[in-house]
Amino acid sequence: MSVQERKERERAVRELLIVATARELAEQQGWDAVTTRRLAERIEYSQPVLYSHFRGKREIIGAVALEGAAELAVALRAATSAADGPRARVTALARAYLDFAEHNPAVYDAMFQLDGGLAFADEDTPKPLKDGFAALLETLAEVAGDGVEPGLFTEVFWAALHGLATLTRAGRLPVGDAERRAELLVDRLAVI
Amino acid sequence: MSVQERKERERAVRELLIVATARELAEQQGWDAVTTRRLAERIEYSQPVLYSHFRGKREIIGAVALEGAAELAVALRAATSAADGPRARVTALARAYLDFAEHNPAVYDAMFQLDGGLAFADEDTPKPLKDGFAALLETLAEVAGDGVEPGLFTEVFWAALHGLATLTRAGRLPVGDAERRAELLVDRLAVI
DNA sequence: CTTGGTTGTCTAGCGGTGCTAGAATCGAAT
DNA sequence: ATTCGATTCTAGCACCGCTAGACAACCAAG
């Protein structure tokens, strides 16, 4: 059965290649430029090959989103673990989140703006997404304040960060004041 | 020159018809369903007529966005003027904003999610958009807190509302707790 | 080593998109 | 009534996501 195993391995490699290429193309030229034709050309296979791995373009976006969620969780934990005290941790968390959104706009879009066919806030939400939320929760729970459900507080904090990230990147907010906005948000929302 | 005047009037009417139809179609079936062909069919003209009014689809989205911004400003002012005291005003503002986003999802998308080719946070930002922000600022300035620029505070508050609105509607946050999230946000951000 | 059949991949094409060139038609002014 | 400019339409471009069916590569059995 070694032949079959090799084939499966090769298939898995190709699937990773598809996702990585889609992500790369999206970061370089935006998701609009990620067409099945271009993607197929870049991986040096024909279009139908994509459909033997994914049901369609939306599933490819979903795959990029999952990859991104895992990375975001790692980035958040790395940032918070390097900070001392609740206050510093929350600041680091916010900064890391906004940095991630700024430096990985296409991945961020795949996660939260585009339809990747993923379930959220649901029992069958994919693990990386739940874990990303968990990473937020870990740090935010200690500054939720008395009588406030940590989960609810995390949702609000997350929404605020998300709003800052998207409005900033879409040019809806003046550039340059991003840092001050983040500071203000942390100051007000977190109960130290 | 009366003939020419009549023609200009008819053109203006038709332009309004295009925008209203686009909006209606978007609210009924989503922006994906708003294709130039369907839109042309609904207004009972051929496709190229659309391009004698707008440079392209994005400009039509922009027109819907401007209409929505004006309506949002009206809704926000109506809500706040009916409330007594800063605290009640901010609560009413938040509720009105989130209600607007919930009940006019397509218009809200046109304003903040889609590319309508509009300038934001800029000197040549269209008046309705500036006015929408002004409507927020009027109420929020009185709860910005000492030493905090009202403009900056408004940006942060707005971003938080925007995050709640989009994440909720995209199914990223559990339904049902929307009201509690809004309350928590107001409690924390506003300095009463 | 050849054959047969399965598995994998590709070519070609469907119906759709935004947008536009050039033909056709309308209507106002002579 | 005829001309001529403005307006509208038909038809088509290049591209999109997606898929049926032809084709090629490969492995197992004889």
Image (spheres, coloured by chain):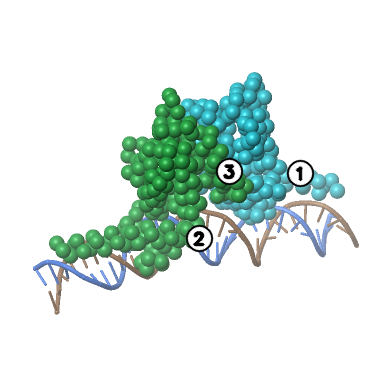
Chain colours: A cyan, B green, C blue, D brown
Amino acid on which the number 2 mark rests in the picture:
Gln
Assess disc 1: are there few (<14), some (14-19) or many (≥20) residues with their C-alpha within 10 Å of its C-alpha. Answer: few
Q: Residue at x 38, y 63 (%)?
A: B47
Q: Residue at x 32, y 39 (%)?
A: B124
Q: Residue A20's x, y, as percent?
A: 63, 40
Q: Residue C24's x, y, as percent?
A: 30, 72
Q: Are marks 3 and 1 in contact (CB under 8 Å)?
A: no
Assess disc 2: are there few (<14), some (14-19) or many (≥20) residues with their C-alpha within 10 Å of its C-alpha. Answer: few
Give the total number of marks visible in the rendering. Answer: 3
The relative height of residue A2 versus residue D11 in the rendered view (above or below) is above
Mark 1 residue element: helix
The answer for how far apart the CA atoms under marks 3 and 1 are is: 49 Å
The answer for how far apart the CA atoms under marks 2 and 3 are is: 30 Å
- Mark 2 vs mark 3: same chain? yes
Q: Nearer the viewer, mark 2 or mark 3?
A: 3
Mark 2 residue element: helix
Q: Residue at x 33, y 36 (%)?
A: B123
The relative height of residue A150 versus residue B68 in the rendered view (above or below) is above
Q: Which mark is residue B180?
A: 3
Subunit of label 3? B
Q: Residue A115's x, y, as percent?
A: 58, 50
Q: Residue at x 49, y 50 (%)?
A: B99
Q: Is residue A156 left or right of residue B88?
A: right
Q: Which mark is residue A9?
A: 1
Assess disc 3: are there few (<14), some (14-19) or many (≥20) residues with their C-alpha within 10 Å of its C-alpha. Answer: few
Residue of label 2? B29
Closer-to-camera residue (C3/B183): B183
